[in-house]
């Protein structure tokens, strides 16, 4: 894939849910603040003329000065809508998971 194609590729996710863990602040080795959120989404969706129950729990990362600001506004049980991009992260054991990097947050 060319650099131009990579730059124009769409990677956008919008999801609404409830925070199911207390938000946690971290700092990267470079000194960047990161607010880690555990967002749980439950809904009914239509697929092939059938209703299905949807459930997902995803880690959300809010980075930079914005993280500091949101750290005082969000608590476990807060309902939020997050828009951002997804990125693959690996834990210390090399287990991969998708993480949502927040670019916009709305409290619901």
Image (cartoon, helix red, strand yellow):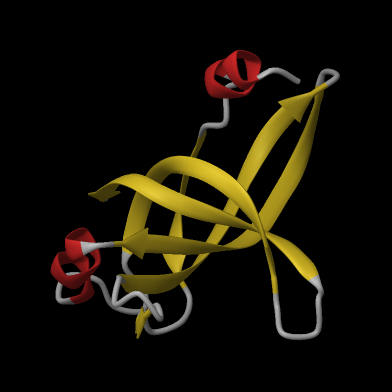
- Name above or below for residue 2 compared with residue 100: above
Question: Who is closer to the viewer here, 105 or 61?
Answer: 61
Residue plotted at (29% across, 73% down): 33
Task: Name which quarter of the figure residue 59 lies in.
Answer: bottom right
Q: Position of residue 32 (x, y in %)?
A: 30, 71
Residue plotted at (19% across, 59% down): 66
Is residue 43 rendered to the left or right of residue 70? right
Task: Name which quarter of the figure residue 89 lies in.
Answer: bottom right
Q: Position of residue 5 (x, y in %)?
A: 64, 15
Task: Count every numbered label the image shows and give the total.
Answer: 0
- Name above or below for residue 26 compared with residue 17: below
Q: Position of residue 108 (x, y in %)?
A: 26, 50
Q: Position of residue 22 (x, y in %)?
A: 38, 84
- Name above or below for residue 35 compared with residue 44: below
- Name above or below for residue 75 compared with residue 11: below
Question: Who is closer to the viewer here, 52 or 7?
Answer: 7
Residue plotted at (40% across, 81% down): 29
Question: Who is closer to the viewer here, 71 or 48?
Answer: 71
Question: Who is closer to the viewer here, 63 or 60?
Answer: 63
């Amino acid at each position: 894939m060319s650099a131009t194609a990579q730059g124009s590729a769409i990677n956008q996710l919008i999801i609404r849910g409830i925070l199911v863990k207390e938000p946690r602040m971290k700092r990267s080795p470079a000194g960047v603040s990161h607010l880690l959120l555990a967002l749980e989404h439950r809904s009914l969706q239509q697929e092939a003329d059938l209703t299905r129950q949807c459930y997902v729990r995803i880690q959300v990362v809010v980075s930079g000065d914005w993280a500091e600001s949101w750290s005082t506004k969000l608590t476990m049980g807060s309902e939020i809508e997050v828009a951002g991009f997804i990125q693959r992260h690996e834990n210390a054991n090399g287990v991969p998971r998708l993480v949502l990097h927040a670019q916009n947050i709305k409290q619901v």
